[in-house]
């Protein structure tokens, strides 16, 4: 085995980590956990591996750039032009620019579980902000165990390893559903893709709101986040279901507004026949017709927390996850 350990890539394969992690560990960088660093150093000593001068100097300078990555394993048709992505990316760009960093943006369709390792190994940025865990929480947890400058926007679940910043999605889902119940809704439909953590937590919150109510039906309807596809999803559901809803809780403002359009095409009025609540409180929710009731995520504050946490981690400091409070915003759609 000793004869095979000639490069940091050989050592990385043996250690089960990325080459960038090996480089950082051997250079004594604090962005790698002490446990991982010690394991890598012992393997290097055991196999008499001595890194080249290039490898030793690989991490001596900051790049002055932050990678912002959007993984779309749960909904591959979604695009960066999605209003939520654009709002959060815009806020992140403002925060990073004011602190002297450039932003390098990537949209990733994960086909293998090494997509994040490859981005790290490319060594073009000082750290990463991941927008949405998608269905990639296991990948984020694995990388977070060996790579410190990584923060994700999204939901928090007990036991996760990676650092996240996001709204209490369970509470948000419960607030939205309780509001529909208070408005007299008894046949409520949830629209969203629960393969991702955030929508799944919103659905769990909705279920909690009706748990003690035998007179309320809650139907989970898989719906894409892409507006072009979600319209077809909603229309198909309304055509085949025996339960015509009087309330809709959508996992995003965009899905909610698409639902209102589909209902209008069917001659169904909002809020007269069906009451609709979205999630996010984007600008378009305030300017739609009717203006959309929704659960507000404070995206600007979230962006500040993401950047604050990441910069601390780049400096070698561990940070905990941040859970923001959601706020129910009541408008004309309910």
Image (tube, rainbow, N blue to C red):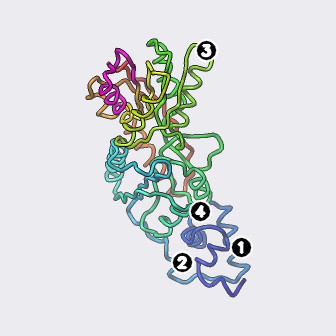
Tag 4 near tag 3, CB within 8 Å: no
Residue at mark 4: 32
Mark 2 or mark 1: which comes first in sequence? 1
Q: Which residue is identified by label 2?
A: 56
Q: Position of residue 42 (x, y in %)?
A: 71, 73
User: Could you tell me how far apart the alpha carbons at marks 3 and 1 are, in whole angstroms?
Assistant: 61 Å
Magenta stretch bounds: 257-276
Q: Mark 2 to mark 4: distance in Å?
A: 15 Å
Name the residue: 43% across, 49% down. Answer: 307
Element class at badge 2: helix
| Label 4 vs 1, first from the N-terminus | 4
> Does residue 315 appear left or right of residue 48 in this picture?
left
User: Badge 1: few (under 14), some or many (20 or more) residues near its Cα, within 10 Å?
Assistant: few
Give the residue number, with chain letter if any, for mark 3.
Answer: 214
Label drawn at residue 42: 1
Image quarter (top left, top right, bottom left or bottom right) of the N terminus: bottom right
- Asked which secondary structure carries label 3, the reply is loop
Circle 4/circle 1 CB separation < 8 Å: no
């Amino acid at each position: 085995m000793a004869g095979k350990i000639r490069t940091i890539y050989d050592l990385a394969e043996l250690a089960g980590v990325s080459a960038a992690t090996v480089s950082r560990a051997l250079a004594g960088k604090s962005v790698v956990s002490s446990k991982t660093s010690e394991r890598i150093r012992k393997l290097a000593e055991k196999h008499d591996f001595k890194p080249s001068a290039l490898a030793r100097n690989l991490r001596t300078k900051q790049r002055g750039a932050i990678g912002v990555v959007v993984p779309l394993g749960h909904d591959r048709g979604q695009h960066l032009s999605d209003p939520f992505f654009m709002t959060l990316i815009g806020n992140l760009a403002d925060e990073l620019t004011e602190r002297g960093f450039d932003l390098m943006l990537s949209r990733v369709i994960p086909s293998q579980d090494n997509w994040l390792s490859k981005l790290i190994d490319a060594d073009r940025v000082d750290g990463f902000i991941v927008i949405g865990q998608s269905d990639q929480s296991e990948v984020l947890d694995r990388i977070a165990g060996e790579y410190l400058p990584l923060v994700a926007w999204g939901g928090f679940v007990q036991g996760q390893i990676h650092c996240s910043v996001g709204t209490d999605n369970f509470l948000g889902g419960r607030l939205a559903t309780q509001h529909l119940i208070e408005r007299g809704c008894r046949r409520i439909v949830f629209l969203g893709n629960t393969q991702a953590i955030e929508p799944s937590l919103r659905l769990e919150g909705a279920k909690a709101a009706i748990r003690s109510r035998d007179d309320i039906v809650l139907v989970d309807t898989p719906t894409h986040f892409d507006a072009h596809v979600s319209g077809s999803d909603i229309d198909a559901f309304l055509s085949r279901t025996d339960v015509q809803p009087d309330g809709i809780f959508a996992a995003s403002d965009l899905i909610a507004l698409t639902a209102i359009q589909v209902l209008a095409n069917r001659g169904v009025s909002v809020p007269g026949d069906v009451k609709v609540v979205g999630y996010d409180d984007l600008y378009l929710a305030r300017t739609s017709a009717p203006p959309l009731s929704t659960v507000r995520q404070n995206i600007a504050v979230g962006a500040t927390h993401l950047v604050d946490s990441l910069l601390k981690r780049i400096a070698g400091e561990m940070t905990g996850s941040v859970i923001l409070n959601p706020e129910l915003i009541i408008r004309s759609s309910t």
